[in-house]
Image (cartoon, coloured by chain):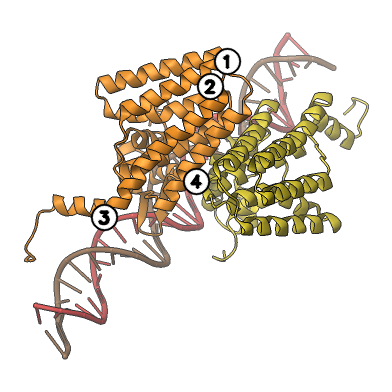
Chain colours: A yellow, B orange, C brown, D red
Amino acid sequence: MDPKSPPIDRVIVDAILAGSIRAGMRLGEQDLATLFEVSRTSVREALIRLETRGIVQVSPRRGWFVIEPSLKEAQEAFQARCAIEMGILSTVATVEPDVITKLRHHIEQEREAIRSDDVGARSYLLGDFHVCMVEAFGNHILADILRDLTARTVLISALYQSTHDATESCDDHERITDTLATGDLRRAAELMTAHIGSVEGGLTKRIDRDPLLDLRQALQLSPRKGGSG
Amino acid sequence: MDPKSPPIDRVIVDAILAGSIRAGMRLGEQDLATLFEVSRTSVREALIRLETRGIVQVSPRRGWFVIEPSLKEAQEAFQARCAIEMGILSTVATVEPDVITKLRHHIEQEREAIRSDDVGARSYLLGDFHVCMVEAFGNHILADILRDLTARTVLISALYQSTHDATESCDDHERITDTLATGDLRRAAELMTAHIGSVEGGLTKRIDRDPLLDLRQALQLSPRKGGSG
DNA sequence: CTCATCAGTCTTGTATGCAAGGCTGATGAG
DNA sequence: CTCATCAGCCTTGCATACAAGACTGATGAG
């Protein structure tokens, strides 16, 4: 395989962030090995990395699966994101001008993806805004952590069919950036908390209303109504 | 190998937290395989997990090494810890009584380790206090993240020979717990920031004074003064 | 028809063998 | 003596082979 081609785990995470790999999907070692034209060993390494990052899990002798977070785990993931972003905003003393520039550029990309109806890019960029922000503050460790957490929350949103309006999120991002530009970190943290909270709120309502959504969808896809074989 | 015996990566992390594995130490695949009586494959998996967690790194065809954080990385690690703990304290609304109970019990263990001069347990417990706190708040995701971050900061402290007084840290922990018990989360967050800051401050001063410490130690250990073979 | 049993197939778990590259120390030219 | 060169050793990287367990679907007893 070309040395320049992106690593397998990167490809999988990108697919998750873009929404093309959903929670619960099976990731067979041999299948991936065939697709990427490598041996099972390399695939296995990638899967182990993803498992360590909390993105997939293995069921012994059964297979690898993308995580399906429970409601409790989903809440923890959102709380974790919220805490980390609150924390970085509380820790940072000042906000450099180039941070604002980067964020504004990112928001432009978001708007572009929304305009062109590119669902994958839109999903990716909306999540990546938060990573971008932390990275702009110069902390790569927290940025990496937040990237994994974002992957989890994307899976959660898809799992619980949260369709929190993309334009609304983008507007939130813009408001947060504007507030950061004024230097009012405290207010920015409040807005960030509200933003994450509104995304989270949208999905917990849905799972509460329709906990059997995936099963229902599956039953609709297979239209057999009688019981005969 | 016994199925009940702890996994290799766990053993290594515990050793790091206890201070018996230091930054820069080489971890050869074959050596570990021999020690744990497994094949290189299993060792490799464990090392890949640790690499993903940011605890070891591999130099291609040269070997696996425990990370040696640069000053910048060290500062980022401390900032990350600080941000996460600030964040969780800002996010949590109230503090349950059993959280206080757990923390007080933990502090008791710390004091016991200090009294009995058990360096390994002392190092482990002082770092674990923070993990314990986050875990007591019910967020396992953040607790896991903090555990890895603690491993990094332990390595950093040893690398830069910070001997921030254990009793002092323990006293800090007690003050923080007392403040949490009163429900004043804001004040607790301030104390926590100061606590982490003081630990960090202790080591940055040292590296600033003596950036060649490890080399100097190595030269002292090998007392050859003449150049002859 | 219902249900327990079991062989067959498919999955991951683990060990092993070989390939590729880095490091070291001997060796010989200058 | 100094230094460039290179063979040998040691390391990880990767592929493959086999072992062990889980699921499935056929089969036969009741």
Whether callout 4 and callout 2 share a subunit is answered yes
Residue contact at pointers 1 and 3, CB within 8 angstroms: no
Q: Amino acid at mark 3?
A: Leu
Q: Secondary structure at mark 4?
A: helix
- Residue positioned 85% across, 30% down in the render: A216
Quarter of the image for residue A56 reads top right
Please report whichever mark, 4 or 1, sits nearer to the chain's N-terminal start.
4
- Front residue of this view, candidates A124 and A173: A173
Q: Earlier in the sequence, mark 1 or mark 2?
A: 1
Residue tagged 2: B136
Q: How far apart in space, not on screen, are marks 1 and 3 (Cα)? A: 47 Å
Could you tell me if the residues under marks 1 and 2 are in contact, i.e. CB atoms within 8 Å? yes
Asked which secondary structure carries label 3, the reply is loop
Q: Earlier in the sequence, mark 1 or mark 3?
A: 1
In this orientation, which residue lies closer to the viewer: B78 or B60? B78
User: What residue does disc 1 label?
Assistant: B96
| Residue annotated with mark 3 | B212
Where A24 sits versus B109, above or below?
Answer: below
Q: Against A129, is A201 above or below?
A: above
